[in-house]
Amino acid sequence: MTTPVQDTQPRPTPGRIPRPWRLTYLGPQGTFTERALRTLPEADGSRLLPAATAARALELVHRGDADAAMLPVHNTVAGPVGDSVRALAESPAPGVLREVVLPVEFALLVRPGTPLAAIRTVSGHPHAGAQVGGWLAGRLPRARWLPAPSNAEAARRVRDGACDAAVAGDFTAAHYGLGVLVAGIQDTAGAATRFLLCARSGARVVPPVRQADRTSLVGRIAGPPDGLGALLDDLRRHPFLRAVSLHTVPDGRGGSVLFADCPGSAEQPETARAVGLLRLRLPALRSLGSYASAPCAPPPYERRLKTMHSETTTAGEAAPRDIARLRERIDDLDRSLIGTLKQRLETSREIQRIRTGGGGAPLDSGRELSVRGRYAEELGEGGAGLAEALLEMCRGRSPR
């Protein structure tokens, strides 16, 4: 075995893997996950290994072919990243080392010379599709969506002629010889994705940046996510768990995977009490460890607002123009929201057709509880009211 070259830094802590590290990520090259990994100073001088799936990335870590893996786990608009959450539940004892939060904006990438009117197929990661659905419905209503394991893989498919356009970051285009046809196609401004750098439990690949202030758990639970509304609501009402974030995704076998975030380190009494209660109620949950949570950088739209404010304080006459621009932005957002709501309404009607066609009830009270809880968690006090209005619009509209 080759002895690593020593530098002028202090000797590594016993048990810590010396640099250069082998860091894997959800690839291929050009993903937001790679970009998140490259924000860490530890990535400099390390070997970066793309993996086709989250499960493959964790497999490389478990086998010792990589020291740590960067995975996307949650988006502020699209919710938990199912593939990553399932992979964390299935991988043997992973532990979280670091968290990165990255603002995300999407562009439509095409082969040079492709006009918008020629696009018949669009590919991207399902999470990207959820964040640009309104734009696609309004601008490319006839285009067929082709899900891909990653946005960079979608770009590669466009390069190879397998589809017409890809939804990805604008920085992805250069990796695959593509052009940015339209930038900023996301339906919601200021979205961000959370990424976790994971290693084998107990490994010390990178030094902690500061004291741990978040503890995460993951595990399988019985029943599909749509049927877990009552259970999750009961957990969220418990006085020890009111600050805990709970998210579920289908496990692909008729059950669910639960991902839980508890504020604080597992060494703190309040956090230890919450973790203990969760594992008592759901014994399959296992801890991913405690780590420092990453403060989210101001989203691009918020930064633009701050810049505009600083400019208008010295030039008051610019305020009406700024307000007009912001109102145009609101109009654009409203159009995207309306397009998305129409899609949701039609999807709800289709579910009702299927349920009533099989002799079932048109409504699922457990599912409605889950929807209310999700909206309340993400949007605060007014979220539950918004969810109720949305459910009322979709409720009882099966075809005559």
Image (cartoon, helix red, strand yellow):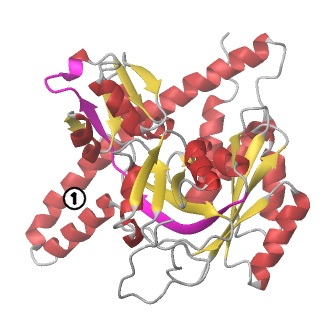
Q: Height in image: 46 above or below 337?
A: below
Residue 102 percent across, percent down from the top left: 41, 60
Residue found farthest to the front: 1
Residue 198 percent across, percent down from the top left: 58, 61
Q: Quadrant of residue 358?
A: top right
Q: Which residue position is annotated with label 1?
A: 323
Q: Residues within 10 Å of mark 1 (few under 14, many from 20)?
A: few
Q: Height in image: 133 above or below 214?
A: above
Residue 48 percent across, percent down from the top left: 40, 55
Q: Is residue 36 visible?
A: no
- Quick one: 303 or 85, which is closer to the camera? 85
Q: Secondary structure at mark 1?
A: helix
Q: Height in image: 373 above or below 333?
A: below
The residue sitting at 24% across, 47% down in the picture is 328
Viewed as shown, does residue 234 lie left or right of 170?
A: right
- Quick one: 4 or 386, which is closer to the camera? 4
- Quick one: 12 or 121, which is closer to the camera? 12
Q: Quadrant of residue 397?
A: top right
Q: Which range is magenta? A: 93-117
The residue sitting at 18% across, 60% down in the picture is 322
- Residue 101 among magenta residues: yes
Residue 96 percent across, percent down from the top left: 61, 65
Viewed as shown, does residue 348 lie left or right of 277?
A: left
The residue sitting at 36% across, 15% down in the picture is 142
- Residue 193 among magenta residues: no
Viewed as shown, does residue 394 lie left or right of 241?
A: left
**Which image quarter holds the C terminus?**
top right
Q: Quadrant of residue 123?
A: top left
Viewed as shown, does residue 138 lie left or right of 69?
A: left
| Amino acid bearing label 1 | Ile
